[in-house]
Image (cartoon, rainbow, N blue to C red):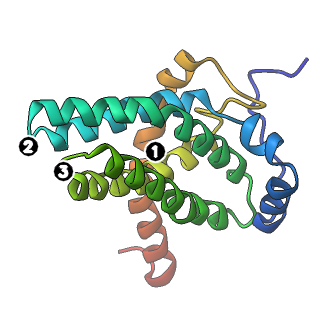
């Protein structure tokens, strides 16, 4: 039985190998890796985004947008989270990150736009713009967290409440990562100030 106290780190693989594996075994990578943690979190957050933006149209429009998100978002986000979890083990790591913040959102937002357009969401342009921005930030955060075995549902997973207890510390590390990278680059390039 695996030791749950030690994080399980997937073997790094080139993104092309991961994509080929997904293409040849889609059931294994798309259906079996549906990430319920991503489905839950994304549904709550995106429904809130669409509700808030559409409140500027009317309360009825906001509720309609919220319900639309709750109908399709769990399915889409569960698959999206599973794919993100698969890409956390890319080598070099930036290739997986780019897939998560460029390729997956492009597909996701075409689906989202189509569903909300068909549904008649009032503030569609603003809703999608906020949703795309959120996708980039949440994709970066999810990749950061999943590389630390948080919010994963595959091997090495922890209970959801344990993940939630760890999220504030990981969020702080995520927010500090950019400034720290700039600091390290500056020190390496120009020496200490």
From the viewer's perspective, tell me whether residue 101 is left or right of residue 93: left
User: Foreground residue, 171 or 135?
Assistant: 135
Secondary-structure class at tag 1 = helix
Horizontal side of 71 relative to 18 (left or right) equals left
Q: Position of residue 192 (x, y in %)?
A: 41, 74
Residue at 62%, 41% in the rendered image: 79
Q: Residue furthest bottom?
A: 190
Q: Position of residue 171 (x, y in %)?
A: 42, 40
Front residue (pair 170, 19): 19
Residue 10 position (above or below residue 90): above
From the top left corner, tell me how far across and down residue 118 is, in percent.
35, 48
Q: Nearer the viewer, residue 107 or 21?
A: 107
Quadrant assignment for the C terminus: bottom left
> In the rendered structure, are the residues bearing label 1 and label 2 in contact, judged by CB atoms less than 8 Å apart?
no
**Does residue 63 appear in the picture of this structure?**
yes
> 87 above or below 42?
below
Q: Tell me the element at label 3.
A: loop
Locate residue 137, reporting x and y percent: 40, 53
- Mark 3 residue crowding within 10 angstroms, few (<14) / some (14–19) / many (20+): many
Above or below, 27 against 113 in this view is above
Q: Residue at x 49, y 51 (%)?
A: 139
Q: CA separation, marks 2 and 3?
A: 8 Å
Give residue 56's mark: 2
Residue 48 in view: no
Give the alpha-carbon distance from disc 1 to disc 2, as whole Å.
35 Å
Q: CA distance from mark 3 to mark 1?
A: 34 Å
The disc label shown at residue 25, or none: none
Q: Are marks 3 and 1 in contact (CB under 8 Å)?
A: no
Tell me if mark 2 has few (under 14), some (14-19) or many (20+) residues whose alpha carbon lies within 10 angstroms of its own.
few
Would you name the residue on which mark 1 appears? 173
Query: What residue is disc 3 on?
Result: 123
Badge 2 marks a residue whose secondary structure is loop
């Amino acid at each position: 039985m695996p030791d749950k106290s030690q994080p399980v780190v997937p073997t790094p693989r080139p993104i092309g190998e991961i994509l080929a594996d997904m293409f040849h075994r889609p059931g294994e990578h798309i259906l079996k890796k549906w990430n319920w943690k991503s489905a839950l979190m994304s549904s709550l957050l995106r429904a809130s985004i669409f509700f808030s933006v559409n409140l500027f149209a009317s309360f009825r429009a906001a509720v309609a947008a919220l319900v639309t998100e709750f109908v399709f978002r769990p399915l889409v986000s569960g698959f999206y989270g599973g794919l993100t979890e698969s890409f956390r083990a890319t080598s070099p790591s930036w290739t997986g990150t780019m897939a998560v913040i460029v390729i997956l959102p492009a597909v996701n937002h075409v689906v989202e736009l189509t569903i909300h357009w068909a549904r008649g969401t009032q503030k569609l342009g603003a809703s999608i713009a906020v949703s795309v921005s959120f996708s980039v930030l949440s994709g970066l955060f999810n990749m950061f967290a999943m590389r630390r075995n948080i919010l994963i549902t595959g091997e090495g997973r922890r209970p959801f409440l344990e993940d939630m207890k760890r999220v504030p510390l990981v969020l702080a590390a995520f927010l500090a990562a950019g400034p720290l990278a700039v600091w390290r680059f500056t020190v390496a390039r120009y020496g200490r100030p």
